[in-house]
Image (cartoon, grey):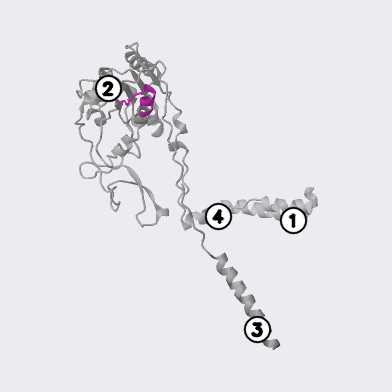
Amino acid sequence: MTIMKTFNIKSLIAIAVMASVIVSCKQDVITLTPPPVTTPETPTGSKGSADFTKYVSIGNSLTAGYQAGALFTEGQQNSFPLILSKQFSIAQGTTLTFNQPDINSVNGYNSSYSSPPSVIRGRLVLFAADGVQAHAVPTPAGATGVPAPYNTADLPTPYTGDKTKLNNFGVPGIILPQFLTPDTGNPAKTAYNPLWARFASQPGVKSILDDVLAAQPTFFTFDLGNNDVLGYATTGGDGSIPITDQTPFATYYQTAIGALMTNPAAKGVVSTIPYVTTIPFFLTIAYNPIPLDAATVTQLMGPTGFGGYNQVMQGLAGALTANPGTFGLTSAQDHFLMECLPQVQ
C-alpha cells in the first residue's frame, strides 16, 4: 500500500512538471506592426545673390570626373560639378540642366597602360590574378584575365551631343596656358589634348575659354593651376614636364578670370592650388620598398650590418643584468630596461 501511494505521488509530480513545461513553451502570437511612415523633409536652400541658371564648370581631371586613371561613364556621373548642380537646383528652386560631354565608355581609356592600336587599357580595378582577394592589386581594365564588366577599354571618340548646351568644360591633364589657346584642339601642336578636341566646338580654332564664354555662364567654378606644378613634381623636377613660371602664370590666371568676369552679373568660385606634396603620390610608403633575398638578408644581418648593432645591444644587456647597481638601477628597473632594448630580428 505504501508503494502505491509513493508511485501515485511521484506520478502526479511528473504530470504537473510536464504540464508546466507545455504551458511555458506555448508560442506567443506575434502581432506585426508596420514601421511608422515618415515623410522626408523637402530640402530647401537659398541662392542669395547668385544665379545658377547656367552653371559652368572649368577645370581639369577632377572637374571632368576622371578617376582611377581614366575618364569613363561612371566617373563622369560622379563628377563634383554634377553633384554641385543638383544642390544648386535646390537653391534655385527649379531643376537645372547640367550637360557633360559623355564619354560613353564603361572603363574608358588609360594612356599610362595603353599602346594604341594594339594595346588598349581602361580604368584601374582591384584584381587578383590567382583568385586570392588578399593578393589583389590595381590592374587596368582590359588586361588579361580581368573579368567582365572590366574586360574592355575604349579609345576616346568625338562627342556627338549638342556642344552648345554643355556645362562641364573639365579637361583631364590640361595646364592653365592650354585653357587659353586654340592649339589645345590642334593635333599638330604640342599643346594638343584629345580629350578637349573631342568636344571642342571648333578644334584648333576655338580655345576652351572661347567655348566657355559662348556658353554665357551666370555662375562658374574655376579649378585650374594645380597641373602647372603637379607634373613637374611627380617627375622629380627633372624638367621632362616643366613647371609654369610664376610671372606668366599670374598673367594667364588674370587673363582667364578677367574674361570670365566680363559679364558683371556672373559670379563664381575660384579654387586655390593645394600643396602638391601632400597628395598620396608623395606620402605612400610601400610595405616592401626593398626586395629582400637570402643574400641580402645575410648581408644585412652580418657583422657590418645589423649583426654588429645586435652585438652591441647584447653586450649592454649583459652588463646591465650582471650589475645593475653600477648603472644606478634597481633589479625591477633593470628588468624593465631589458624589455625596452631593441634588437633587429
Query: Dot 2: what SS?
Result: helix
Spot occupied by residue 283 in the image (x, y as percentages of width and height): 47, 38
* Discs 2/1, front: 2
Q: CA distance from mark 2 to mark 3?
A: 103 Å
Taking the spot 33% from the left edge, 37% from the top edge, the residue there is 75
Q: Are marks 2 and 3 in contact (CB under 8 Å)?
A: no
| Camera-side residue of 241 and 264 | 264
Q: CA distance from mark 4 to mark 2?
A: 60 Å
Binning the other alpha carbons within 10 Å of mark 1 as few (below 14), some (14 to 19) or many (20 upward) gives some
Res 253 seen here: yes
Q: Residue furthest front?
A: 1
Taking the spot 71% from the left edge, 56% from the top edge, the residue there is 318
Binning the other alpha carbons within 10 Å of mark 2 as few (below 14), some (14 to 19) or many (20 upward) gives many
Give the mark nearest the N terminus, 2 or 3: 3
Residue linked to disc 4: 301
Taking the spot 47% from the left edge, 43% from the top edge, the residue there is 285
The quarter of the displayed image where residue 116 is located: top left
Res 304 seen here: no
Give the mark nearest the N terminus, 4 or 3: 3
Query: Dot 3: what SS?
Result: helix
* Discs 4/2, front: 2
Give the residue type that dot 2 points to.
Ile
Taking the spot 34% from the left edge, 44% from the top edge, the residue there is 124
Residue linked to disc 2: 208
Residue linked to disc 1: 321
Question: The C terminus is located in which quarter?
Answer: bottom right
Residue linked to disc 3: 7
Give the residue type that dot 3 points to.
Phe
Left or right: 278 with respect to 102? right
